[in-house]
Image (cartoon, helix red, strand yellow):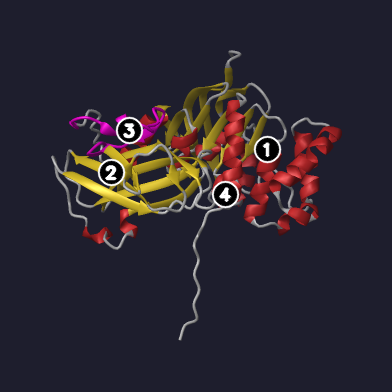
Amino acid sequence: MRSDVAIAADRLTKTYRIFDHPGDRIKQAFTLGRKSFHRGFTALEDVSFEIGKGETVGVIGRNGSGKSTLLQLVCGILKPTSGKVEVNGRIAALLELGSGFNPEFTGRENVYFQGAILGLQKAEMADRFDDIAAFAGIGEFIDQPVRTYSSGMFVRLAFSVAVHVDPKILVVDEALAVGDADFQAKCFQRIKAFQKSGGSILLVTHSLEQVGHFCDRALLLDRGKLVADGSASRTLTTYGERITGTGRRMESAPASIDAFSSHPSYNEKETRWGDRAATIAGICLTQEGLKDPATFHAGLEMELTLTIEYHADVERPIYGLTVKSSDGAPLFTTNSLQSPAGSRFRPQGPGDIVQACFRFQPFLDAGEYSISVGVVGETQEGIVVHDRRYDSIAFCIGRTLTPSGEVAVRPSFRILD
């Protein structure tokens, strides 16, 4: 295994024995292999990949595609039926809810227990304990049995332990979907810091936005097989094609000029995917009559206008917008269906150009934010992604509305007759 590789999987396969009746296990034991009372189920088949040090890789796929099995093999919880997986460095894992914690132990006891599993001495964990407890933020529940925790409290403690044991590799299986918005934001900040320190991350999630924001690469599993391994944008596009069954990809959509990428705040590292039946060719941000100013004022209405060019028939287009913090935490999301005018959008065809406009009031603190936009089509088979551009435009809230630095909400009050 090369020194610059964090995880290496070579022809990794995992097959489970499936028994139809509990008694069949006993019968199988007595036959000494001469007769079979089970059938095999291959959850993972001949999967090979490498993850470099400092690389963040997402694992996506439908339910039952083998994602969680892969993570358990990487973490050493399961042994492969054939093939091998090698890990270079201490690994900290956030797997399925409840994994690795004893429900009868208190949170404090589980912290020390997890440290012992990872090879840390009790004194080392004692030095880290206050930081772990502060990050988790569960207060006096740290000394209560874990079985009394809510799912959110459990994830807070599990994530806090994982990031405070100095891992070289962080493995996460959907855990961030459980925490509340504030805790997710704190987790995203920690993940960013972990990436900057050169740590490697293997992330399983159904949130394609998280893959687009955090991942350098993505692996796509389907029925236990690795069907795509490439850049996040290309793998996400392949995934969209497979789940909708369209098989349509217009890599070179006949758009005239992509004015979008000429925007003064365009992010060249955006993640973009979709079949390009429609493309987002332009964007404009306006506030108080000024187009694309260098900074915006908190609380004053902003207008975001997208120019959409159509290259194929789209029966029911939906336009979307997400604003995120600089750490990648979603602050708000909206789409055209949530608007009173959402039902009035007409079908579009090749050559059509649509101006889609969002208005919102950014009651946000001063700082940097990112904008993600998209156009999809609603069909009987599901949502078809035509063009999603994640973390594509940056904007800055330069100052708030009041001299004290607080956001002015301008409240009013009256007594109803």
- Between disc 3 and disc 4, the foreground one is 4
| Image depth: mark 2 or mark 4 in front | 4
Q: What kind of residue is marked 3?
A: His
Q: Secondary structure at mark 3?
A: loop
The residues tagged by marks 2 and 1 sit, at their Cα atoms, a distance apart of: 41 Å
User: What's the distance in space between the residues labelled 3 and 1, CA to CA?
Assistant: 40 Å
Q: Which segment is the magenta one?
A: 254-281
Task: Determine whether 150 is above or below 122 in the image.
Answer: below
Q: Is residue 250 magenta?
A: no
Please tell me in which quadrant of the rendered image residue 259 appears: top left
Q: Secondary structure at mark 4?
A: loop
Q: Which mark is residue 405?
A: 4
Residue placed under numbered mark 2 in the picture = 306
> Residue 310: which quarter of the image?
top left
Residue extending farthest to the front is 403
Residue that mark 1 sits on: 162
Label 2 is placed on what type of residue? Answer: Leu
Q: Main secondary structure of the magenta part?
A: loop
